[in-house]
Amino acid sequence: RVEGDGACLALDLHHFTEGSALARTVMWLCEIHRESSGGVLGRVPARLAIITGWGRHSDTVGSSSLKDVISAFLLKVQSPFVMSTSNKGRFVCETQFVSNWLQDVAQTYPTRSLDLQDGLSKQSLLCYFKK
């Protein structure tokens, strides 16, 4: 979804399970990569956000297993996303930094770039980039 003044494209993972949120995050990053490598980055807003929530609806308020899983994944793949200082349930980054990072990943691993393993089912999901 595009938010506010149209300057931010957000992936809202509220109500996703951990495994489906990981899969959707990888798919979304692949979509961003395709948009940016196809020369149409201008169609993508200047900022990107991944919304996990901070745990308001969790059994333990303020504790979000979804946020923890997505945070660990973003660290594992060395993404440029950081937790928002104004909303602890949101990871943010400038689109150009994400685009540059995805280009570097695609060049380093031309056939397989993002390999995620779901901690529950031990299934691997691979995101393939085409040059």
Image (spheres, grey):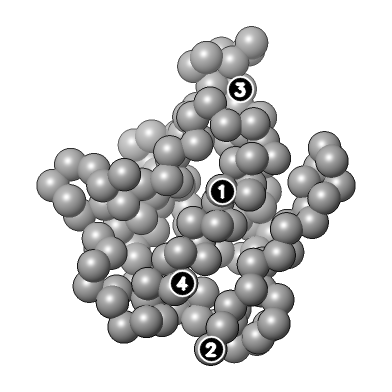
Residue 84 x/y as whole percent: 40, 44
Residue 23 seen in the current view = yes
Along the line of sight, the residue nearer the viewer: 51 or 19: 19
- Amino acid tagged 2: Lys
Secondary structure under tag 3 reads loop
Q: First in sequence: mark 2 or mark 1?
A: 1
Whether residue 79 is situated above or below residue 67 in the rendered picture: below
Please name the residue shown 22% across and 73% down the image: 42
Q: First in sequence: mark 4 or mark 1?
A: 1
Please name the residue shown 67% across and 36% down the image: 18
- Quadrant in which the N terminus appears: top left
Secondary structure under tag 4 reads helix
Secondary structure under tag 1 reads helix
Q: First in sequence: mark 1 or mark 3?
A: 1
Mark-to-mark CA distance, 4 and 3? 31 Å
Q: Tell me if 125 is positioned left or right of 85 in this view.
A: right
Q: Tell me if 23 is positioned left or right of 121 in this view.
A: left
Asked if the residues shown at circle 1 and circle 3 are in contact, with their CB atoms under 8 angstroms apart, the answer is no
Whether residue 21 is situated above or below residue 7 in the rendered picture: above
Residue 108 x/y as whole percent: 65, 86
- Amino acid tagged 3: Ser
Mark-to-mark CA distance, 2 and 3? 40 Å
Q: First in sequence: mark 4 or mark 3?
A: 4
The residue that mark 4 highlights is 33
Rate crowding at label 1 as few (under 14), some (14 to 19) or many (20 or more) other CA atoms within 10 Å.
some
The residue that mark 1 highlights is 24
The residue that mark 2 highlights is 131
Residue 63's disc number: 3
Q: Quadrant of residue 51?
A: top left
- Amino acid tagged 1: Arg
Q: Which mark is in front, 4 or 3?
A: 4
Mark-to-mark CA distance, 2 and 1? 22 Å
